[in-house]
Image: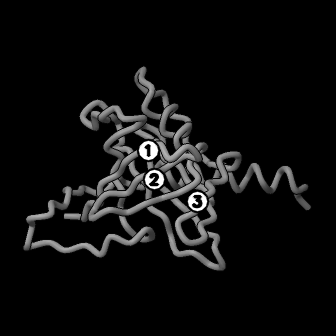
């Protein structure tokens, strides 16, 4: 019988191998004027493309994988998320009651690909760690810290 540590390591390895094989969908941004596309911009089940970190625009053209996050359905205030931090795929858990948000940053599983130099992944994880609130305005999602500063901003996109 496997010990709890061995079981956890095996689960982590399987999760990472599945994430590494999952292709990133081709997406296009929604504009406020696009009458041919519609998206119910709910917190959950929306592809949120990272567009800024700490008030700096994120250049997705230099990323291996587009930085994004998808929050899955909540059950009693708890849920799972998946996404990419610019190079590595990630998944983890979160808790959200109303607009309060706690991301369990100690248990984020990430692939460990060799990535180009850059601070997008590091800053994305820092923003996730500091987030206490989320706010949706139109097709934009903001992660907000305890000082009411916007740490990260996302734009809702739809699959092509």
52 relative to 45, above or below: above
Locate the C terminus by quadrant.
bottom left
| Local crowd size for mark 1, using a 10 Å CA cut-off: few (<14), some (14–19), many (≥20) | many
Q: Position of residue 7 (x, y in %)?
A: 80, 56
75 and 4: which one is in front?
75
Which disc number belongs to residue 83?
2
Of labels 2 and 3, earlier in sequence is 2
Estimate the spatial distance between the alpha carbons at disc 2 and disc 3, rounded to whole Å.
17 Å
Give the number of the disc on residue 101: 3
Q: Earlier in the sequence, mark 1 or mark 3?
A: 3
Judge whether 84 appears above or below 87 on screen: below
Q: Residue at x 73, y 53 (%)?
A: 10
Say which of 23 and 101 sits in front: 101
Q: Residue furthest top?
A: 117
Residue 10 horizontal side relative to residue 152, left or right: right
Q: Which residue is mark 1?
A: 150
User: Residue 136, image x and y in percent?
Assistant: 37, 63
What secondary structure is found at the residue carrying circle 1?
strand
Q: Residue at x 57, y 75 (%)?
A: 74
Which mark lies nearer to you, 2 or 3? 3
Question: Which residue is at a point 55% across and 42% down the rendered structure image?
Answer: 111
């Amino acid at each position: 019988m496997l010990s709890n540590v061995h079981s956890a390591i095996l689960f982590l390895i399987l999760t990472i191998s599945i994430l590494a094989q999952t292709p990133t969908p081709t997406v296009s941004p929604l504009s406020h004027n696009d009458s041919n596309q519609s998206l119910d911009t709910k917190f959950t089940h929306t592809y949120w493309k990272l567009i800024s970190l700490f008030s700096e625009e994120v250049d997705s053209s230099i990323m291996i994988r587009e930085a994004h996050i998808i929050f899955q359905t909540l059950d009693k205030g708890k849920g799972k998320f998946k996404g990419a931090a610019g190079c590595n795929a990630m998944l983890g858990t979160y808790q959200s009651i109303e607009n309060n948000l706690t991301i369990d940053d100690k248990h984020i599983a990430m692939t460990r690909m060799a990535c180009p130099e850059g601070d997008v992944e590091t800053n994305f994880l820092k923003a996730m760690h500091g987030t206490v609130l989320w706010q949706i305005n139109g097709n934009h999602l903001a992660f907000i810290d305890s000082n009411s500063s916007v740490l990260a901003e996302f734009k809702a996109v739809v699959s092509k």
